Amino acid sequence: MGPGKRLGELLVALEGASRVPDLDLLIRGIAYDSRRVRPGYLFVCIQGFREDGHRYAQDAVARGAVCLVAEKRVEVPPTVPVIRVGNARRALALLANEFYDRPSTQLTLIGVTGTQGKTTTVYLIESILREAGYPVGLIGTIVTRVGAREWKSTYTTPESLDLQESLRACLSAGLTHVVMEVSSHGLALERVAGCVFDVGVFTNLSSDHLDLHRTLERYLAAKATLFASLGTGKDRCAIINVDDRHSSLIQRAAACRRLTYGIQNPGDIMAREVRAGLRRLEFTLEAFRETHRVRMSLTGEVNVYNALAAAGACFGLGLDRATIVRGLERVEGVPGRFELVEAGQGYLVIIDFAHTERAVEQLLQTVRGLVRGRVITVFGCAGDRDQTKRPRIGELVARLSDYSIITADNPASEDPREIALQVDRGAREIDSAGQRHAIVLDRAEAITRAIATAKPGDAVIIAGKGHEEYQIMKDGFVPWSDRGEVLRAIAARGTSGRP
């Protein structure tokens, strides 16, 4: 990026900010965590959920910050200018966008939003774009990929400063396209402010994240802002799932070209003659009066929707049908999404990220259609999140499983036992005697018990964490891997589960 930017160059992005005396002040970098401040940096004070960046203003100055952006008064030396703004999160996003020379305007940016399917859909779009010969980057829940570099993600949608830095890195690496997951948190917390999207994809919407949004209406409104931001440009396109009951609001929010997809309701892109097996998924893709048989290495109707969403995004970019189909068929799987663990056992073990009511229901129904034996489910609910869904998920899992074990799943600051008891209230609506479900708070023990219970032909589902390699506990992050623990439990049991 060179030596940096003059403060006046950055402030053109902000409206309603207080005036500062020295617009020629050189800004060498931006930070929102005082520990990352270096000499010559601008520090943005953000009010977080647990920490308030305004408390660290003096620490930022001590580390070399030459200017601060804040929503409220901070005590710093009079030689350090403080720019007052109404929304520091939005200010951070717009300042970062200017600092990195508005990278999204120089890329083809595809944003995928929805309660479920974001991760798989971005993987599918990435595969299609690669099949078309485009150098493409990916920003999502599991990883961020920039050319030959790849690193694990912290958030589904990164904080705005980190996002703009990643987009600039994509340009520097010679990439032309970037596909990213756009979460409701990312939209509501202004993480994508300043980004110019060429394509927006809506997968679906069901109850989730009400700890942040409070109501389903506000949750949906946050999703809709992505499509409103597309504007009316002739090259912009919204891809919308017409089988979702909330799709009409998304269509109204999008003033640009719209392509719809679905299985049940008429759309521009549709799937017919769906056939799903354990390691295969076939359907006929119908689009613009032409058809093509698609054969994928995924399974379940939910992945038909993900494939249609990805196809729609790429049709919106002008790609041809044959390239789209080849790109879809190249994807062999997505980490933590209906991930099969195969270690010579005679029963299925599936790891999946499902943690919302709809996702859990779809997962269990899909597995029920694939196995003749019992369905054994290990699951839990995260702490510091919407508590209202806990009994409902407990009831749902108890109803669709032959046996289930309630365990810890990122309890965070909450008591794991209290979370489990809330889930248990729902489970007892189906299994009042507690004969078909149990509470085992230690996740390793819960997985071991489920594996020990499985017989040939059964399916063991480990739900909730998927790709995650940690547990969020009261004292912080603890290393964890569902896959690693499953392999350990299978090895400890030996081959007694083989047919």
Image (cartoon, rainbow, N blue to C red):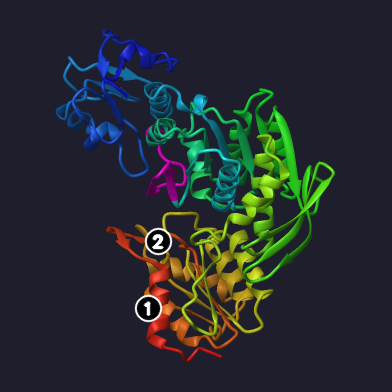
- Of tags 2 and 1, the one toward the viewer is 1
In this rendering, is residue 225 above or below 457?
Answer: above
Magenta-colored stretch includes residue 428? no
Mark 2 vs mark 1: which is more N-terminal? 2
| Horizontal and vertical percent position of residue 73 | 28, 23
Camera-side residue of 252 and 318: 318
Q: Amino acid at mark 2?
A: Asn
- Kindly state the secondary structure of the residue where label 2 is placed: loop
Considering the image in quadrants, where does the C terminus appear?
bottom right
Q: Is residue 101 left or right of residue 53?
A: right
Q: Amino acid at mark 1?
A: Arg
Camera-side residue of 354 and 310: 310
Considering the image in quadrants, where does the N terminus appear?
top left
- Kindly state the secondary structure of the residue where label 1 is placed: helix
Mark 2 Cα within 10 Å, few/some/many (few <14, many 20+)?
many
In this rendering, is residue 370 above or below 186?
Answer: below
Magenta-colored stretch includes residue 148? yes
Name the residue beneath numbered marker 2.
410
Name the residue beneath numbered marker 1.
488
In this rendering, is residue 283 above or below 349?
Answer: above
Q: Residue 292, can we see it?
A: yes
Mark 1 Cα within 10 Å, few/some/many (few <14, many 20+)?
some
Q: Name the residue: 46% across, 86% down.
A: 452
For residue 46, the mark is none
Q: Is residue 32 left or right of residue 141?
A: left
Q: Is residue 59 left or right of residue 118?
A: left
Camera-side residue of 83 and 452: 452
Q: Which residues are magenta?
A: 143-161
Q: Name the residue: 42% across, 28% down.
A: 93
